């Protein structure tokens, strides 16, 4: 919480730079209040510092860390009265930290520079993970760090790249910082100013989707900018552990990764299919490829940026984007969704079952990256898909109680649980979430957190056995 508060000083400085005194003071008030409360809590819990954290403590810290970070992050919006209603401010902040990109704002350009920067900065912090950042900076967590990373990191498993989890977190953040600097520089080279370049970089690498413009990236009529953001969305949707292997000289491990190859294949094939379908809409194959590649990357990686209102595209292209909403990025990426590795594993299991029907006595093993996958990995994957679909239907039912049609209700659930942002119907790329009543906004906020923390982290806390000694 203290770290989150200290990061508020950056948008405060930007607010004062642009002579937005009210916004700047709002950040200082929020940061000061949260820091004082945090120090008080630290003193209250000083007696338990010598106790080692286990898995249960890790799940609790991650889950409630996300909740309280969103509560704290909403304060500047409310104090400045730029988002006066706390429900809306919490929804916007949870959407930021969970890198969903769903917004209740009807006038984005009406926000101050400081607030726009903070809105995008929540993406950047949540992208690689508030908890991973904490592990990297606070060695006091010690052995508990691995439990925290397991609870927060996207995907079915976490590769511990170095013996000390603190070093792992530092490596992940170093790669993240490098990408941030490079993309910001390229966007400035393409014509963006530093403010727009940094905020859109935050949204890209976090696969979040918050923009400083109501028309999103489409407000920048530059093919170069569109291509740069497309490339970095694709990079952000890949497993960051692979980049560590690449810089470590393990080139073979990088290229033999099953998930990476499937992920890039999905992106490439769907981009080509949509590009061909859009030729009549954009005149040339080059332009249609540009728009198709951007929107495919945006939906596949659950970023949510837009250069066009894809709800107006031909039915074939819209349907492909709809199916991509179920996929998501790679495990170990900043993307949301079910993850490519889970769907790949389930597909291979299905193929093996068909082979077993032909050869009942045959032994068919599930292999990923050339290695046999143990059953104790397969079961959680199957369970995740089951819970994901059940929650998707449940959230759809809750949204439909507001009287909204099935397309709006279902894609709202899918866009929030999958941390995508835009959907179809009344939550399309040119729309927002402001029209929902408060109770639905709170349910969708919970859905965003569930999706970002991969369901199990939150759901396990709700089981009676979790609280038994």
Image: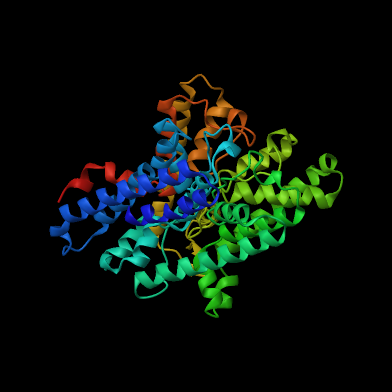
Up-down relation of residue 273 to residue 433 (above or below): below
Up-down relation of residue 294 to residue 261 (above or below): above
Give the quarter of the image for residue 52: bottom left
Asked if residue 12 shows in the view, the reply is yes
**Residue drawn where x is 28% and y is 45% of the image:** 461
Up-down relation of residue 208 to residue 168 (above or below): above
Left or right? Give the position of 33 relative to 159: left
Left or right? Give the position of 2 relative to 171: left
Q: Percent x, y for residue 423?
A: 59, 36
Q: Nearest the camera: 110 or 143? A: 110
Give the quarter of the image for residue 374: bottom left
**Residue drawn where x is 38% and y is 53% of the image:** 4
Left or right? Give the position of 118 relative to 218: left
Q: Nearest the camera: 425 or 265? A: 425
**Residue drawn where x is 49% and y is 52% of the image:** 121
Q: Nearest the camera: 316 or 404? A: 404
Q: Percent x, y for residue 296?
A: 66, 48
**Residue drawn where x is 28% and y is 41% of the image:** 462
């Amino acid at each position: 919480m203290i770290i989150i508060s200290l990061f508020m000083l950056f948008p405060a400085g930007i607010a004062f730079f642009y002579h937005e005194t009210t916004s700047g003071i709002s950040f200082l008030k929020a940061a000061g209040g949260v820091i004082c409360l945090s120090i008080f809590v630290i003193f209250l819990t000083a007696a338990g510092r010598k106790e080692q954290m286990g898995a249960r403590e890790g799940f609790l810290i991650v889950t409630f860390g996300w909740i309280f970070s969103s509560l704290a992050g909403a304060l500047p919006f409310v104090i400045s009265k730029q988002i006066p209603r706390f429900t809306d401010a919490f929804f916007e902040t949870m959407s930021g930290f969970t890198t969903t990109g769903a917004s209740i704002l009807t006038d984005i350009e009406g926000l101050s520079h400081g607030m726009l920067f903070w809105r995008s900065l929540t993406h950047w912090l949540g992208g690689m993970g508030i908890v991973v950042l904490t592990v990297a900076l606070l060695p006091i967590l010690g052995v508990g760090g691995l439990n925290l990373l397991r609870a927060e990191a996207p995907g079915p498993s976490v590769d511990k790249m170095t013996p000390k989890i603190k070093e792992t977190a530092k490596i992940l953040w170093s790669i993240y910082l490098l990408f941030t600097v490079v993309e910001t520089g390229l966007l400035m080279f393409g014509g963006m100013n530093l403010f727009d370049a940094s905020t859109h970089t935050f949204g890209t690498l976090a696969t979040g989707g918050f923009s400083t413009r109501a028309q999103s990236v489409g407000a920048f009529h530059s093919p170069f900018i569109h291509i740069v953001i497309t490339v970095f969305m694709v990079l952000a949707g890949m497993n960051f552990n692979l980049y560590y292997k690449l810089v470590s000289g393990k080139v073979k491990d990088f290229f033999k990764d099953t998930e990476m190859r499937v992920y890039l294949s999905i992106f490439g094939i769907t981009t080509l299919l949509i590009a061909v379908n859009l030729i009549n809409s954009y005149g040339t194959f080059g332009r249609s490829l540009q728009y198709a590649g951007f929107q495919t990357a945006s939906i596949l990686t659950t970023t949510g940026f837009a250069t066009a209102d894809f709800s107006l595209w031909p039915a074939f292209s819209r349907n492909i984007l709809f199916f991509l909403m179920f996929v998501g990025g790679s495990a170990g990426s900043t993307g949301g969704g079910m993850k490519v590795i889970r769907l790949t594993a389930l597909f291979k299991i299905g193929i093996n079952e068909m082979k077993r029907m032909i050869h009942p006595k045959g032994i068919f093993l599930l292999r990923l990256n050339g290695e046999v996958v143990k059953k104790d990995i397969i079961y959680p994957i199957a369970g995740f898909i089951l819970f994901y679909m059940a929650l998707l239907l449940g959230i759809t039912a809750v949204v439909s109680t507001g009287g909204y049609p099935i397309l709006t209700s279902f894609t709202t659930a899918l866009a929030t649980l999958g941390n995508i942002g835009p959907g179809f119907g009344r939550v399309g790329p040119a729309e927002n979430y402001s029209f929902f009543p408060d109770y639905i906004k709170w349910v969708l906020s919970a859905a965003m957190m569930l999706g970002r923390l991969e369901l199990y982290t939150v759901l396990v806390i709700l089981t009676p056995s979790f609280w038994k000694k």
